[in-house]
Structures are given as structure tokens and as C-alpha cells.
Image (cartoon, grey):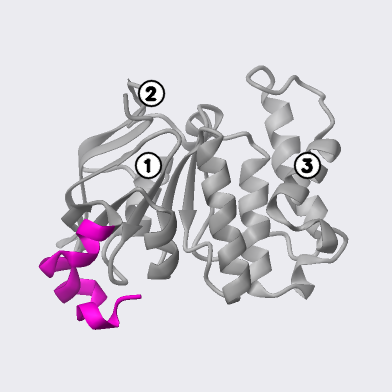
Amino acid sequence: MAHLEARGISVRFGGKAALNDTSVTVDAGTVTGLIGPNGAGKTTLFNVVCGLLAPQVGEVVLDGDDITHAPPHRRARRGLARTFQRLELFTSLTVRDNVRVGGDIRNRWGGGRWRRGSDSGADADRILELTGLSAIAGREVSEIPTGQARLVEVARALMTRPTVLLLDEPAAGQTEAETAAFGALLRRLAADGLAVCLVEHDMSLVMDVCERVHVLDYGRTIAEGTPAEVRADPAVIEAYLGTPEGVT
């Protein structure tokens, strides 16, 4: 069974169709790509999945349960976590304190994988090591580059112990070395059973880490398949990737 499914999602803003009968499936233990030009509807779809936006048509299913009408906090407690295209961090706090916030919130939920009152500080140290942020844990977020700040947001999301992780352009601003390390992190998270959906414009990263890729254009799904299938699809080349010679 698919871990997360968005089925036949349609969203309109006035007379504009942001999403039109769009479907995406994200399986546990895999990284699924969601790509397309700016304005294609990728972030809108994330907002629908997280409960920040209600679709006019369609449903969101998690582990076989319809959560289309569940509020965002209920979805988070069911295992959904995300990062944002625009950074949403506490810039006056340290990297470690930003990461720890996720654990403090998770502990207040009670039950689940963590018991109430567990030490989020120790868990933060583990996540900081996992994400390669230990060396800058004591620095304020306002002092670090954008690429590292985006990784802080990923680490904070991981502190909630999600089963589904939605990442909105997490590699933006990263150096080539940082992106390579981030790709290795995504593969490790998937190998541990996490379902990851990746919105990203870095096609080298997408083609390297994703098992399946969904392509949106003007709110419609124009292709879905393996990275190799998507990269060779004429509709995708025309709408987004450009000529095959330009694809890396």
C-alpha cells in the first residue's frame, strides 16, 4: 500500500486552476520527485497534503485513511512533516535550539514513538550528527549560509519523527559538496523506511536520488515514471528540461 496518496486534486484560485486532477503517490522507503516550472503547482500540492489548503476536488490518503478534511496538526501527529520554499526558522536562536524545537513539540503530543517528557536535547544531538550540522550547532541561524539553514529546517522536521517528509526546494543555496552530502542523507532516510517527496530544481539531485518522478506543468501532471523515463519524455523536455543535450 502506498504510504501517501494525493488523488485527483483540483484547486482553483478564482478563475485560475492551480491544480487540475493531479495525483501523486509517495511510497515508504523511497524518495519521490515532484518537478516542474515555477508556478506549476508543486507548493500548492504540498499545502493541500499538509492541510493548509483545501482542494475543491480530490482526496489525500495516508496509510489507507482519508485525511482530506483533517486539520494540519492532526496530520502532523499522523507523521507528516515538511520544509518550506521560504525559510521558516528562528533566526535569533542557535542551530541546535532550532532543531530542538521540533523535539519539544513532539514530546508535548505524548504517545507515539516518543514518550512524553523524553530528552529532546539528546535527540537533537543525534539529528545534528545525522544531518552533518554538529560543527555549527552553537551558531545563530542568522549567521549561517542559506544552504546550511535549509538543512537546519530538514533537521527540525526530522525531530518530529515523521513517516512522510515533504521537502520544498531543500537544496537551494547549497554548494556542490553540500548537495552531494544531502543526496546521501536522503538515500539513508529512505533506506530507514521514510517516505520522502522532493520538490527541487536541481535536476542532478532529483535524477540521482529519486526512484519515481512526477512532473507538473500548469497544474497538470504531464509525466510520471523513473528518472530515465521522465528525462526522455518529449513533453517534459519541451515544458521544463529543455533539449536532451542540456540535461545533466
Identify the residue at horizontal 35%, vertical 48% (top origin): 211
Reply yes or no: does residue 237 show up in magenta.
Answer: yes
- The earlier-in-sequence mark between 2 and 3 is 2
Reading the image, the residue beneath label 3 is: 126
Give residue 116's quadrant in the image: top right
- The earlier-in-sequence mark between 2 and 1 is 1
* Residue 143 seen: yes
Identify the residue at horizontal 82%, vertical 24% (top origin): 117
Q: Residues within 10 Å of mark 1 (few under 14, many from 20)?
A: many
Dot 1 falls on a residue whose secondary structure is helix
Q: Amino acid at mark 3?
A: Arg
Q: Which residues are magenta?
A: 228-248
Label annotation for residue 145: none
Compared to residue 216, the image places residue 57 above or below, namely above
Front position in the image: 142 or 158: 158
Reply yes or no: does residue 63 show up in magenta.
Answer: no
Reading the image, the residue beneath label 1 is: 49
Reading the image, the residue beneath label 2 is: 63
Q: Position of residue 128 (x, y in %)?
A: 76, 50
Q: Amino acid at mark 1?
A: Val
Instruction: Report the Cα–Cα distance between label 2 and label 3.
Output: 28 Å
Q: Position of residue 97 (x, y in %)?
A: 81, 51
